[in-house]
Image (cartoon, rainbow, N blue to C red):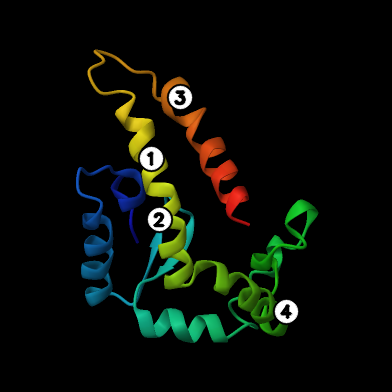
């Protein structure tokens, strides 16, 4: 068991790869561990995660199937989940991701170039309020 205060999900790091490396090291010692902060059992080994994803009776996500989440892919198991996943997969293939990056990277560079030479910037006002809409409009033009 991982105490809430010691949970890897509560700590920050300058190097994002440490999160995965820490979980991988923990997985070499234990196949699963209960994380109090997450309130969940963490399945840490790839082969165990793969087996769990195929065992819909024991490891179901159907509890998400209420309210606005009822029609979402995460609330389905088995055939319906697979059907929805096939639809989504083509939008996240390596080729599709490369096409998105070719459009999004120049927008990101332009967004942050506007901050060059400034003493201060407001992340929300100067970046986050504009960037998503600029990306959305650019991607809309590409459709």
Q: Marks 4 and 3, Cα distance to the nearest angstrom?
A: 38 Å
Is the C-beta separation of discs 4 and 3 under 8 Å? Answer: no
Which element carries disc 1, helix, strand or loop? helix
Q: In this view, does 47 lie to the left or right of 24?
A: right
Is the C-beta separation of discs 2 and 3 under 8 Å? Answer: no
Front-lying residue, 88 or 117:
117
Q: Marks 2 and 4, Cα distance to the nearest angstrom?
A: 33 Å
Front-lying residue, 63 or 109:
109
Which of discs 1 and 4 lies nearer the camera? The answer is 1
Quadrant assignment, res 123: top left
Q: Which of marks 3 and 1 is nearer the N terminus?
A: 1
Q: In which quarter of the image is the N terminus?
A: bottom left
Q: Mark 1 points at which residue?
A: 108
Q: Earlier in the sequence, mark 1 or mark 4?
A: 4
Residue 102's tag is 2
Q: Earlier in the sequence, mark 4 or mark 3?
A: 4
Locate residue 110, reporting x and y percent.
36, 34
Which of discs 2 and 4 lies nearer the camera? The answer is 2
Q: Which of marks 2 and 4 is nearer the N terminus?
A: 4
């Amino acid at each position: 068991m991982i105490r809430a205060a010691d949970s890897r999900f509560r700590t920050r790091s300058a190097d994002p790869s440490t999160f995965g490396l820490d979980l991988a090291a923990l997985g070499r010692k234990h196949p699963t561990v209960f994380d109090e902060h997450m309130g969940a059992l963490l399945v840490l080994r790839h082969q165990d995660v793969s087996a769990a994803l195929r065992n819909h009776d024991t490891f179901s996500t159907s509890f998400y199937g209420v309210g606005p989440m009822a029609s979402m892919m995460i609330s389905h198991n088995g055939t319906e989940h697979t059907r929805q996943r096939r639809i989504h997969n083509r939008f996240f293939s390596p080729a599709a991701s490369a096409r998105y990056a070719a459009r999004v990277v120049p927008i990101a560079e332009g967004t942050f170039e506007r901050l060059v030479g400034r003493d201060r910037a407001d992340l929300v006002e100067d970046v986050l309020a504009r960037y998503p809409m600029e990306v959305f409009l650019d991607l809309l033009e590409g459709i």
